[in-house]
């Protein structure tokens, strides 16, 4: 069975209107607003309670979704910070420490175990999870706060926790409305109702269709978005899509054969797909980021490899992360829609 890309499907009204995933992507901003609204009262109460407590010795992000918090907080948090994605806690964690947990669906046994351990040790505990869920039940304790969220969306749940951490001076600005606005802007630009000529996600999907993409982001958050976008592309196409640091992607670019002007794209099979460099640019301009971006682009140019760039002008780090991630997910979904099998 051979797969090929039918770009006409990207403007086919019947196909697009029946796609559930596109609808879910369009609702990303609404989920952030809903999660923030659902948790507003509990967040205010938690902030008021924290005013009477000493600053924690350390912040521990527990559970499998802790890596997103690490990407945001590590460069900023004024106290030692550690992400602990396993079902337990560091041996030193105790009553002087704050444990924060993202549990979008609240059903994970490992996350529930970590929360129960934090409560047993007398840690301050802040958990964003659906009320009445398994994780919420294990979080019950004197020093625990549950921020109720029912969206089951990782980003929306993370914004709730980051909003709390900002208000107690333990994290950077994470304005939920700015994140939601950035997501809405992407949804407008990448809407299935915008035709291919003016839709950046559809254009990117066409570029992805006959390549094996290498996805790179320079900042910590852009790099995390790159990994998530590559994962979405793999799921959409079943093809190789790599995300990594510059030193990991450079050898792949340099090993690619130079482009031959006499290549017949219709004769090449799936095994002959060339790499494409996809850069997620969140505006980071640190010298090391500029250097790595320049080396990757120069290596791609030397081999005739196509380079595509996703950009964002959102006002905060979290909003820029959300914008890049959603743009990449839209492109991956349009790629899935366009791929057909004979």
Image (cartoon, rainbow, N blue to C red):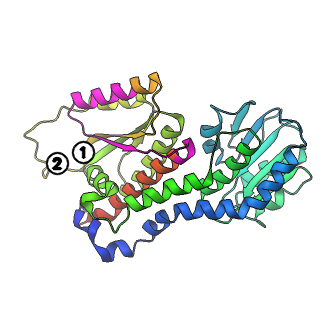
Q: Earlier in the sequence, mark 2 or mark 1?
A: 2
Using the image as rendered, state which of residue 315 and residue 79 is in the foreground. 315
Q: Is residue 231 left or right of residue 89?
A: left
Q: Residue at x 73, y 60 (%)?
A: 39
Task: Tell me which residue sits at (28%, 27%) in the image.
Answer: 299
Query: Magenta part of the protein: which range?
Result: 292-319
Q: Position of residue 62 (x, y in %)?
A: 72, 44
Give the tally of numbered discs.
2
Residue farthest to the left, as pictured? 262
Magenta residue check for 302: yes
Mark 2 vs 1: CB contact within 8 A: yes
Residue 268: give its label: 2
Q: Quadrant of the N terminus?
A: bottom left
Q: Secondary structure at mark 1?
A: loop
- Callout 1 crowding tier (Cα within 10 Å): few <14, some 14–19, many ≥20: some
Q: Residue at x 63, y 65 (%)?
A: 34
State the mark number for residue 264.
none
């Amino acid at each position: 069975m051979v797969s090929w890309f039918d770009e006409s499907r990207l403007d086919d009204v019947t196909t697009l209107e029946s796609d559930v995933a596109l609808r879910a992507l369009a609702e990303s901003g609404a989920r952030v607003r809903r999660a923030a609204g659902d948790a507003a009262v509990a967040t205010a109460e938690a902030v008021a309670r924290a005013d009477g407590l000493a600053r924690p010795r350390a912040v521990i992000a527990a559970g499998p979704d802790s890596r997103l918090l690490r990407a945001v907080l590590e460069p900023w948090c004024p106290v030692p910070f550690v992400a602990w994605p396993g079902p337990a806690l560091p041996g030193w964690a105790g009553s002087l420490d704050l444990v924060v947990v993202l549990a979008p669906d609240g059903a994970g046994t490992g996350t529930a175990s970590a929360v129960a351990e934090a409560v047993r040790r007398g840690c301050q505990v802040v958990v964003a999870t659906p009320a009445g869920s398994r994780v919420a039940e294990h979080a019950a304790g004197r020093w625990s706060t549950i921020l109720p969220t029912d969206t089951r969306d990782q980003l929306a749940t993370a914004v709730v926790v980051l909003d709390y951490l900002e208000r107690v001076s333990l994290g950077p600005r994470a304005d939920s409305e700015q994140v939601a606005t950035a997501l809405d802007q992407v949804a407008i630009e990448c809407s299935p109702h915008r035709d291919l000529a003016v839709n950046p996600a559809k254009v990117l999907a066409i570029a992805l269709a006959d390549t094996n993409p290498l996805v790179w982001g320079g900042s910590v958050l852009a790099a995390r978005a790159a990994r998530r976008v590559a994962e979405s592309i793999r799921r959409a196409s079943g093809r190789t899509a790599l995300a990594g640091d510059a030193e990991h992607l450079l050898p792949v670019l340099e090993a690619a054969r130079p482009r031959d002007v006499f290549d017949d794209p219709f004769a090449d099979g799936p095994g002959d797909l060339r790499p494409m460099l996809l850069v997620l640019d969140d505006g980071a301009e640190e010298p090391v980021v500029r250097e790595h971006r320049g080396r990757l682009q120069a290596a791609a140019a030397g081999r005739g490899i196509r380079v595509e760039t996703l950009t964002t002008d959102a006002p905060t780090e979290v909003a820029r992360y959300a914008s890049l991630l959603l743009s990449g997910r839209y492109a991956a979904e349009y790629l899935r829609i366009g791929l057909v099998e004979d």
